[in-house]
Each structure stands twice: as C-alpha cells, then as structure tokens.
Image (spheres, rainbow, N blue to C red):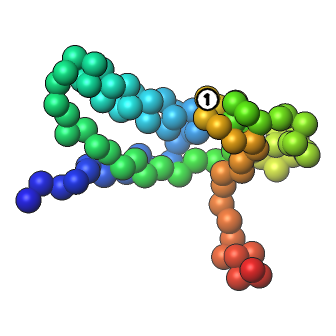
Amino acid sequence: MKDAFKTIDLGRMSYAEALAIQEQHFNGILDKKRKGQSHDDSVLLLVEHNPVYTLGKSGDEKNLIHDPKSIGAEFYRTTRGGDITYHGPWPNSRVSNF
C-alpha cells in the first residue's frame, strides 16, 4: 500500500527558509495540475524554527504590542489571512496552567 503522503524532517532552520521550501512544494503541485499531469507529491514538512511573529494580510500591525526583537523573535508579513500569530516554543509548565 502506498503512503498517503511523504514526511520530510527539515530539522531546524529559519522561518524564511522553511517557508521557501513549503512554497516550492506547493508551486510544484500547482504546475503539474496546470499541465494536466497527475501528481503524488503530498508532503508533510516537519520543521523547528526560532520564535517568529507573523502578520497576515488582513492583520493590523498596531496589534503587535511589543517589538519581537525584545524576546529574540523575528517578524514576517505573510500572504495568508489572520492577524498577529506567535510561532515558538511553549513551555509545558505554562500549558499546565490552563
């Protein structure tokens, strides 16, 4: 039986590098679809990156209440929806408070 998707462990890299790899896979699938070619390119990318804040295309930068650099995070505008999203480590001790 064929796997439903391929898993690729990218390890640790920057958010920008991981996004570029994700977009390469996505655009490769789109190109094949446009050409009427079949594809079996479904991929699950596993990656860890440094803390990052993203601002979606419908977001408002004034909702970013502090400078990401103050906690060692980067900031990226994205082409996706949404407002400000934090991507980073979340200590288990904090999760247990909920």
Give whichever of 60, 88 is nearer the camera.
60
Give whichever of 13, 68 is nearer the camera.
68
- Residue 3 in the image: above or below residue 78: below
Does 65 sit left or right of 9 as displayed?
right
Which residue bears the numbered disc 1?
79
Residue drawn at x 82%, y 43% as measured from the top left: 68
The quadrant where residue 42 appears? top left
| Residue 76 in view here | no
Element on which disc 1 rests: loop
**Residue 9 in the image, given as x and y percentages of width and height:** 37, 51
Residue drawn at x 90%, y 37% as measured from the top left: 62
- Residue 35 in the image: above or below residue 21: above
| Residue 32 in view here | yes
Residue drawn at x 75%, y 42% as measured from the top left: 83
- Residue 80 in the image: above or below residue 72: above
| Badge count | 1
The quadrant where residue 93 appears? bottom right
- Residue 73 in the image: above or below residue 3: above
- Quadrant, the C terminus: bottom right
Furthest toward the left, the residue is: 1
- Number of other residues with Cα within 10 Å of mark 1, as a class: few under 14, some 14 to 19, many 20 or more: few
**Residue 55 in the image, given as x and y percentages of width and height:** 73, 37
- Quadrant, the N terminus: bottom left
Residue drawn at x 68%, y 65% as measured from the top left: 90
